[in-house]
Amino acid sequence: MARDFIPKIATGNDLLEGDVVYFTESGDWTRDHGDAAVAGTEEQAQALLSRASGFPQQVVGVYLAEARIVNGRPAPVHFREVFRTRGPSNYPHHGRQARA
């Protein structure tokens, strides 16, 4: 039995700052997970990954991550992706969590 497709977003790390970034529908990168472009089919996901992988001098480690839609915006599914939205988890005064 085939597994239902889970929506996906493209994510990676900003090469200069190291921050987690997400690929948007307009072809830019954002630090807001909720602004990421969402692929609703496997074909869309592969096209999204292909587009997002076209910035090797700006973003590295690009991959697809599962997302669920909450109030019309993507939200992380896996705990690893939840951690990535918050920044380093070793100290609360590091990363994005310090700016929140």
Image (tube, rainbow, N blue to C red):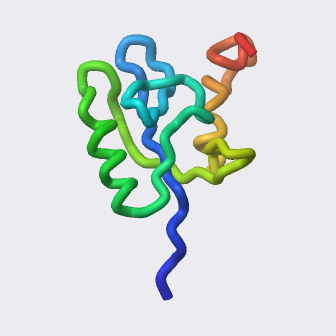
Measuring from the top left, give residue 59's x and y in whole percent.
34, 25
Point 61% across, 24% down: residue: 87
The vertical placement of 100 against 6, above or below, is above
The vertical placement of 61 against 5, above or below, is above
Which quarter of the figure has residue 16?
top left
Which quarter of the figure has residue 84?
top right
Of the pair 71 and 5, the residue shown nearer to us: 71
Point 52% across, 36% down: residue: 36
99 horizontally vs 53: left or right: right
Quadrant location of the C terminus in the rendered image: top right
Query: In the displayed image of the protein, which residue is found farthest to the bottom?
Result: 1
Measuring from the top left, give residue 81's x and y in whole percent.
59, 41
Measuring from the top left, give residue 96's x and y in whole percent.
65, 17
Measuring from the top left, give residue 34's x and y in whole percent.
62, 35
11 horizontally vs 81: left or right: left
- Residue 84 visible in image: no
Point 74% across, 45% down: residue: 71
61 horizontally vs 84: left or right: left
Point 53% across, 57% down: residue: 7
- Residue 6 visible in image: yes
Of the pair 12 and 67, the residue shown nearer to us: 67
83 horizontally vs 51: left or right: right
